[in-house]
Amino acid sequence: MLMKSNEIAQVGVIAAVYAACTLIALLFLGSLAWGPVQFRVSEALCVLALFTPAAVPGLTLGCAIANIANIAFSGTGMLGLLDVVFGSLATCAGAAFTWKMRERPAVALAGPVIANALIVPAYLPILLQATGFYTIPFTSISLDGAWPFMYLFGLVATGVGEAVIMYVLGYPLGKSLARTPYFKASSPFAHARESVR
């Protein structure tokens, strides 16, 4: 299926905004945007998948761009490609779930939470060691041979961080966007209210 020119433009704008927000978060929040406990503020933009299917490739591309740029900033070298591939995959899966479940916004926003909580902790210990972490954060447990513990820690920490972003920032952002003329026609929030009646 070919995309129309306005959809391609949407993909480009969403990718640029996501990448810019992620890199700004890196500058001001440091490891909170990429570290063991993540509050990647730009993930709130996943709510755009409630309004347009162009958000799925747009968010994925934006995540890949931001993660490629982070390779230079963090010094992870080729290991940073794990984040480019699998971090972008998590964003893609979460955004696709959000688009698919858009008629139920509160449920739809769980997609990015679940995708990031399951995928990111699988490779995060490798990246942490590459950037100078040698123990599970906030513990004295060594990362050497502690992958199952690190995965469980990451599952909880990444899941909680993503849930805070999606429901404290993303959900209100989505409701605000739904009131604007540009997004009003495609707003799932009106449908959600009608289905409750």
Image (cartoon, rainbow, N blue to C red):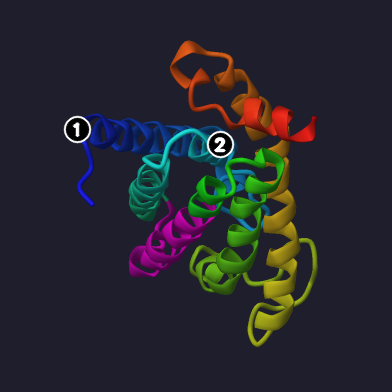
Quarter of image, res 190: top right
Q: Which mark is residue 47?
A: 2
Toward the viewer: 192 or 114?
192
Crowd tier of the residue under label 2, counting other residues whose Cα lies within 10 Å: few below 14, some 14–19, many 20 or above: many
Q: Is residue 170 magenta?
A: no
Q: Report whether 149 appears left or right of 188.
A: right
- Residue 146 is situated, as x and y percent measured from the top left of the image, at 69, 83
Residue segment shown in magenta: 74-94
Position of residue 5 measured from the top left corner of the image (x, y, whole percent): 19, 32
Foreground pick, 168 / 192 = 192
Say what amino acid the circle numbered 2 marks.
Answer: Val
Q: Position of residue 183 (x, y in %)?
A: 48, 21
Asked whether, in this view, residue 143 is left or right of residue 30, the answer is right
* Secondary-structure class at tag 1: helix
Main SS, magenta region, reads: helix
Residue 154 lies in quadrant:
bottom right
Point out which mark residue 42 bears: none
In this view, 63 is above or below 120: above
- Eye-nearest disc, 2 or 1: 1
41 relative to 142, above or below: above
Nearest the eye: 93 or 71: 93
Residue appearing at x 42%, y 68% in the figure: 82
Q: Quadrant of residue 9?
A: top left
Taking depth in this image into account, of 130 and 64 the one nearest to the observer is 64
Q: Amino acid at mark 1?
A: Ser
Tell me if mark 1 has few (under 14), some (14-19) or many (20+) residues whose alpha carbon lies within 10 angstroms of its own.
few
Query: What residue is rendered at 38% in x and 60% in y?
Result: 84
Dot 2 falls on a residue whose secondary structure is: helix
Mark sitting earlier along the chain (2/1): 1
Q: Which residue is mark 1?
A: 5
